[in-house]
Structures are given as structure tokens and as C-alpha cells.
Amino acid sequence: MKIKIPFLMFLILAISQSLYSQDETLSSLLPDNDTLEGLKRTSEIESYVGDDLFSLINGGADLYFEYGFVQVISADYANREGNSLHVEIYEMSDRSAAFGIYSFQQMSDDKPDEIGERGQIVKNNALLIKDRFVIKMSAKFPDDKVEDVLKTSAGLITSRITVGDFKPLMLPYLLPVQDNDFPQVKFIRGSIALRNIYNFHNEDIFKFNDGVVGVYQEYVIFIFQYPGSFKALQQFGVARSQLEISDRYSSYYSHRNQFQMVDKRGNKVHCLTFDKFIIVFIYQGNRNLTPFIEEIKYNIELTY
């Protein structure tokens, strides 16, 4: 007992110091007082770890946990003129998780904004990512100042983020580009994100590691990645057997490592497996998928 008690105390102290240093590091990314437009912090820095996230995000926290949520802090700023700035900094498990959250929440006004590694400013709001961090900001300033305030704030925060070992996310490079039709790219890491795009089944029939979705003008392509080709083929068989008996689909047709069906909205769903991937097309009407399939296969062989 004399040995266990000191060790337990040491363990608790070590965990406490670890949690404190995490929060302290995240807090150090926030803008200092008077660094722009006379803004001073008007609130305590609020920190949310684990299930605390549900009290900050109403209805969307599960998606963050699916990608790999670590912690988030938020702070409010204001100046003497009554202008204000709200900042939230989310730490995710890795840069892929940060990109996944960004890909689902990205705003668009057809105007590129050079903030972070990827980022966008739309009206009074900014969303950007750098490394494993997602930064959200909203500002209440006159129209002629709000964009500069958000850009300057973004620059102050991202300049303090040290980028770790850079391993590019290769999945988006598998998506085809036909006739200069570039897709909106979404990175997914589980069934919650997948169902936000298309609900194939009530059960998690694909059970993929990571996935990428290309949303094109007239069709959608899903590419699910697995540890190896055997696992991909195995899960392909599970998905095929479940979808074949589902009352959501009709006109089921299967041939070798491909099958096709039609959902209740008239969308054709075409699924195949290649290497360690499952590939799904959703489209309407008649479409020759061969050029798309061949380009994806070429990209897989080139990339992996």
C-alpha cells in the first residue's frame, strides 16, 4: 500500500499536468489583447473536453467525435466602439480529421480567401484549418472592416500553429475529373458523415477506415478505403447481401465484383470493388461509367 498510494498520486498529477498543458497550449493560439482594432478579451477562456462538447454544439457533436475530437476553446473580444469578435479553436486528432470537419462545414461564396491551409470568409464568418486545428470566427464590425478583422485574426492564430510531420491526404486524388467537372470534396471517417450525404442502409454496411466523396454536378462518387484487398472484398460482399434484400432499392443486378440497383428517388447506385477500395456511383439516367472507373483505377495504381 505504501508503494501504490504515491504512484497513484503521481499518476493523477501527471494526467492533470497533461490536461493543463494541452489547454494552455491551445489558449496560447488566441489573439492577445489590443493586437487588432483595440479588441480586448471580454470573457474567460472556455474549454470543452470530451462530452463537454455537447454543451457547445447542439446536434453536431457526434460528427466531431467520429473524426477524432480532442478539445476546443472559445473566447469573446470587444472594443470601445462596441465591435466584437468570437473565436473557437478546435483541436482534432490529426490533420485529416480537421480537413474532414472543414469539408462538411465549408462555406462558399465563389471567392477564394488565402487564410490558413484552407479557409473561407463569408459575410461576418470565417472557417479555416491549419494542421490539426479547425478555427471558427464570427465578427460584428462595419462592412468595410469585418473582412480585414477576420483575415488579421486568422493570420495571428495560424502564425502560432507549429505544423507537425506533413503526410498529405491522398484519397481526394483518386477522384476523377471528366470534362473539367471538378467535384466538391468531402472526407469521411464513419457512418455519421456518410449518412449526411447519402443513407445507404440503417446499418453500417461498409465499415470503412477512411473515405472520400466527390460531389459533382450530375453525380456523386464514394471511395471507401480498407486495410487490404481481402477486407475490401469481404465488406463488399456484406454490403451487397444487405442492399440486395433492402426494400429501399429495386432493379437489382449483380455481375462478378459489381452490382447495380435503383433507389426510390430513381437514382442508380452502382458499386464495385478494386484493390483495397469499394467504389460507389450515384447518378440518374444513362451514363457510361467506364471512363470514370478506369481513371479511378489508374489513380489508385499511381497513388498506392
Image (cartoon, helix red, strand yellow):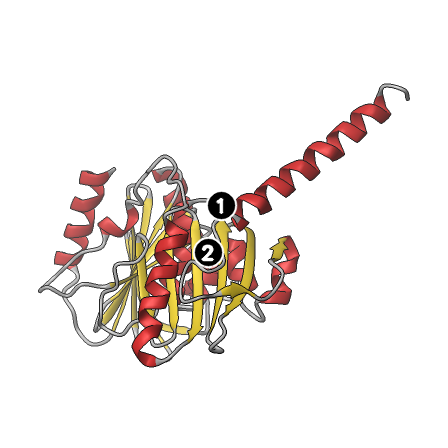
- Which one is nearer the viewer's eye here, 73 or 180? 73
- From the top left corner, tell me how far across and down residue 8 is, in percent: 80, 29
- Which one is nearer the viewer's eye here, 61 or 139? 139
Q: How many marks?
A: 2
Circle number at residue 93 = 1
Whichever of callouts 2 and 1 sits on the residue coming sooner in the sequence is 2
Examine the rendered structure and indicate whether residue 132 appears above or below residue 18.
below
Which residue does the image show at 22% across and 43% down from the upper left?
300
Which residue does the image show at 33% across and 42% down from the upper left?
276
Circle number at residue 249 = none
Which residue does the image show at 51% across and 67% down from the upper left?
77
- Which one is nearer the viewer's eye here, 209 or 146? 146
Disc 1, SS:
loop
Local crowd size for mark 2, using a 10 Å CA cut-off: few (<14), some (14–19), many (≥20) = many
Between circles 2 and 1, the one closer to the viewer is 2
- From the top left corner, tell me how far across and down residue 189 is, in percent: 44, 53
Give the quadrant of residue 195.
bottom left
Quarter of the picture containing the N terminus is top right
- Amino acid carrying label 2: it is Pro
204 left or right, relative to 114: right
Disc 2, SS:
loop
How much space separates mark 2 and mark 1, taking CA atoms?
A: 23 Å
Disc 2: which residue: 31
Evaluate whether residue 81 shows in this view: yes
- From the top left corner, tell me how far across and down residue 85 is, in percent: 47, 69
123 left or right, relative to 110: right
